[in-house]
């Protein structure tokens, strides 16, 4: 019998864009759920004090006893803050409002930028993927996420000022790469809330494609994606047939094809020799 193929290293995706409302949390939740549904153990880490990624996978804010805040200040380990979700193979480390304080409490700590990396990396070997949902700023929490990550996924809404914001984000990523995390690469730009009926959308999309790797999978504007969080479910548990859920399943498939050759589900079973 052939030896099992070596396990690929854990990929840690930071979902980042300093603009609010561009689809970061929606992307983090639905990408993580889609990767887990393709039978890859995945950990979603909520790095935004708003806690929307946590509630998006069904964690009630008032039920949270330990969160990413406690991990960052060293009170608990990552596994102690990890909760199973209703999606098989998907776990979450939730965030609460407490996390606002971390920015202030860590400001004088010499290791303030590497706290998340040091807390995460020793504990995620059994996960194929970790997805970090970043807050809408380039502050200390996003800095920690970019330092902890191996790749950046950038959700982008095709609107007039989108490219300007992207320039700031890319400069930040360059700085993080130079100082803390030389291996950090950009996995790709995912076009979100896409409305192919407007010419501005096409103009912006074409321009972005000229500069960056843009995923083939496009996330359409879809009401199911905005409804699902109020049910505490990723879209694929709320309405798997919806265009939004299907968009994120395609994004996950594209990422899996890049890194794992092919998604596990759908691959023909190897026959015994
Ligand atoms: P961010 O985390 O970047 O602030 P969110 O993911 O929270 O952005 O998205 C902002 C709002 O837009 C939310 O109400 C979300 O439900 C909604 N939304 C996100 N993506 C889509 C989409 N593709 N279609 C429709 N609504 C969306
Ligand atoms: Mg968000």
Image (cartoon, rainbow, N blue to C red):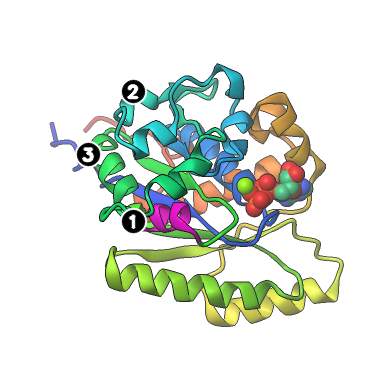
10 Å crowding of disc 3: few (<14), some (14-19), many (20+): few
Q: Is 259 displayed left or right of 1 in the figure?
A: right
Q: Give the labeled residue for mark 3.
A: 122
Specify the quadrant of the image occupied by residue 224.
Answer: top right
Circle 1/circle 3 CB separation < 8 Å: no
Toward which corner of the image does residue 273 lie, by quadrant? Answer: top left
Cα separation, mark 1 vs mark 3, equals 17 Å
Dot 1 corresponds to which residue?
A: 113
Callout 3 secondary element = helix
- Residue identifier under label 2: 80
Residue 102 colored in magenta in the image: no
Q: Report x, y in % for residue 241.
A: 73, 35
Q: Position of residue 206 (x, y in %)?
A: 67, 79
Mark 2 packing: few (<14 Cα in 10 Å), some, or many (20+)? some
Q: Please give left or right for residue 49 compared with residue 218 in the image.
A: left
User: Is residue 145 one of those drawn in magenta?
Assistant: yes
Residue furthest to the top in view is 63
| Residue at x-position 86% and y-position 70% | 198
Question: Which residue lies at the image location 72% right of the left edge and 32% below the top edge?
Answer: 228
Q: Give residue 99's position: percent from left, percent from top.
A: 49, 39
Q: What segment carries the magenta color?
A: 139-147
Residue 238 seen: yes
């Amino acid at each position: 019998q052939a030896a099992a193929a070596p396990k690929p290293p854990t990929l840690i995706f930071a979902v980042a864009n300093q603009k609010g409302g561009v689809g970061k949390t929606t992307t983090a939740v639905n990408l993580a759920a889609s990767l887990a549904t393709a039978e890859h153990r995945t950990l979603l880490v909520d790095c935004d004090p708003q806690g929307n990624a946590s509630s998006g996978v069904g964690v009630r804010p008032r039920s949270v006893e330990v969160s990413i805040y406690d991990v960052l200040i060293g009170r608990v380990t990552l596994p102690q803050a990890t909760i199973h979700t209703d999606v098989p193979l998907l776990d979450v480390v939730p965030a609460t409002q407490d996390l606002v304080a971390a920015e202030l409490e860590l400001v004088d700590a010499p290791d303030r930028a590497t706290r998340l990396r040091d807390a995460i990396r020793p504990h995620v070997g059994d996960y194929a993927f970790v997805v970090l949902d970043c807050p809408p700023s380039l502050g200390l929490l996003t800095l920690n996420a970019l330092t902890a990550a191996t790749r950046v996924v950038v959700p982008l809404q095709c609107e007039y000022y989108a490219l300007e914001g992207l320039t700031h984000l890319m400069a930040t990523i360059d700085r993080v790469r130079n100082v803390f995390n030389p291996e950090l690469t950009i996995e790709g730009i995912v076009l979100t809330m896409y409305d192919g009926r407007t010419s501005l959308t096409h103009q912006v999309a074409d321009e972005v494609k000229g500069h960056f790797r843009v995923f083939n999978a496009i996330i359409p504007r879809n009401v199911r994606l905005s409804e699902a969080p109020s049910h505490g479910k990723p879209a694929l548990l709320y309405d798997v047939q919806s265009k939004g859920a299907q968009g994120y399943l395609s994004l996950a498939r594209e990422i899996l094809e890049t890194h794992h050759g092919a998604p596990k589900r759908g691959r023909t079973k190897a026959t015994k020799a």
